[in-house]
Amino acid sequence: MSMLSHSFSMIATIIVVLAQTLVTVSSLPEADRINSLPGQPQVKFQQYSGYIWVDDQNQRALFYYFVQAEEHPASKPLVLWLNGGPGCSSIGVGAFAEHGPFRPTDNNALEKNDYSWNREANILYLESPAGVGFSYSSNKSFYALVTDEITARDNLVFLERWFAKFPEYSDNEFFITGESYGGHYVPQLAQLIIQTKTKFNFKGIAIGNPLLEFNIDFNSRSEFFWSHGLISDSTYEVLTKVCNYSSIRRLIQNGNLRGVCERANKLLYTEISKYIDEYDVTLDVCLSSVNQQAYVLNQLQETQKIDVCIGDKVTAYLNRKEVQEALHGSLVGVANWSTCSDVLHYDYQNLEIPTIPILGSLVKSGIRVLVYSGDQDSVIPLISSRSLVNGLAKEIGVNTTVAYRAWFEGKQVAGWTQVYGDILSYATIRGASHEAPFSQPQRSLVLFTAFLEGKPLPS
């Protein structure tokens, strides 16, 4: 079967599944309402969580956590958030460690996040694919080899069935956001929505520190390390002329790191040392399991496990029985909830699928696209993301409408930005890590708000 005919066949299958949605979904959103989370401060907005079946025959269910906007939820946009990995939790990372309404504290309570994204939108956090967090497949063979194509298909079925469950949000402006390996999840889901002509009020996507092109993204790491003084001139030369980063990553992925590339890798980490947070090279070492999604992409240090700070609190909180009951979540086939899946086997060959062309096709379809970078991240550095977006603009013939300039949060420079054709844009978040809202929540909220409104970042 040709690739084209395979694609049409897949789309036809999805259309059939979606057509069956209205007869297969019978539960009411009231059953998913969260009365209150343990230790939660009092709030006025509503929260929902629970399961949506995406494959009735094989009993595959995806878990979601939905937070209404703090004010006027009926008129505010709906935003789907997808964390990366592949295989890491949008609830454990995005909701409880980045931009959700609450963060766990030392005493197993929750504190209000003053820069929660639900100040500006209704936020839908999805644990995807099945096998991540509370999401599961009763058919364990599903976990053997999960691909981008399967993930996109299941996410689309989830959305269609979620909207059937919450029809009052069907006309709200809809955006898809994410980070890290979300550079695959988000554009591929967006592309499938366009291809299947699914009737969402779909307006745009935003992805932070995203994996878009394997070679360019990974090879930019050596330049980032060198330009930040983390490696010597001689090691930089080895990484550019003897064995580059993408080759090292590919060999590690296949379990074949040997010879000159193994020596280059050891030289690199001797100089960087194990006391640097590669997800934010300016932070003191207190590595959080928030960063585990990036660690899946990184996988270059052969020994050390990631240390945890806020991630410990999130994991402890989500493993409490009363919390799971309040969330309507279940542990199926696993003993504990974890930030990144221990049961899911993702097809790492999918990392090599370039998604930057998909961004181009979305722009041509009238979908607004924002790529942003926490500028202290060395895992997917701003160097590659900025050059990829700039190259894409030239390739598809979209002219610069806002020249590269600083943008502000309050009276301080919050980053730099460039806009192409008022539909494609790039921005850095100054002082931010791989998970930008985790380390720069206030600046990230300013960027998020401008994106939803379709306005330039403050000057």
Image (spheres, helix red, strand yellow):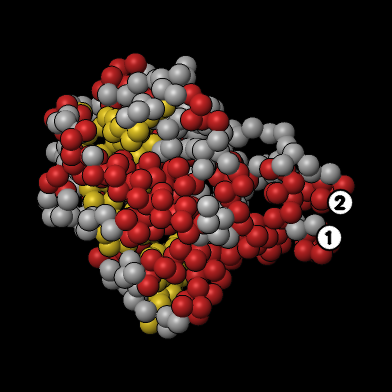
Q: What residue appears at the point 23 percent right and 44 percent down from the top-left corner?
A: 19
Does any portion of residue 203 appear in the rendered image?
Answer: yes
Residue type (three-letter) at the residue carrying disc 2:
Val
Rendering coords of residue 68 (x, y %): 20, 43
Q: Secondary structure at mark 1?
A: loop
Q: Secondary structure at mark 2?
A: helix
Q: Is residue 412 left or right of residue 45?
A: right
Tell which of 183 and 190 is nearer to you.
190
Rendering quarter of residue 218: bottom right
- Compared to 30, does 69 lie above or below? below
Rendering coords of residue 160 (x, y %): 26, 45
Q: Is residue 149 left or right of residue 177?
A: right
**Crowd around label 1: few <14 · some 14–19 · many ≥20 (10 Å):** few
**Crowd around label 2: few <14 · some 14–19 · many ≥20 (10 Å):** few
Rendering coords of residue 213 (x, y %): 58, 60
Q: Tell me, for residue 242, which label it has, or none.
A: 1
Residue, disc 2: 260
Q: Is residue 17 left or right of residue 273?
A: left
Which quadrant is home to the C terminus? bottom left
Rendering coords of residue 119 (x, y %): 23, 50
> Hey, which residue is sitting farthest front in the picture?
1
Q: What residue appears at the point 35 percent right and 33 percent down from the top-left corner?
A: 55
Q: What residue appears at the point 64 percent right and 32 percent down from the top-left corner?
A: 305
Rendering quarter of residue 365: bottom left
Tell which of 25 and 229 is nearer to you.
25
- Labels 2 and 1 touching (C-beta < 8 A): yes
Does any portion of residue 83 appear in the rendered image?
Answer: no
Rendering quarter of residue 333: top left
Q: Tell me, for residue 353, which label it has, or none.
A: none
Q: Mark 2 or mark 1, which has the lower sequence index?
A: 1
Q: Is residue 302 left or right of residue 90?
A: right
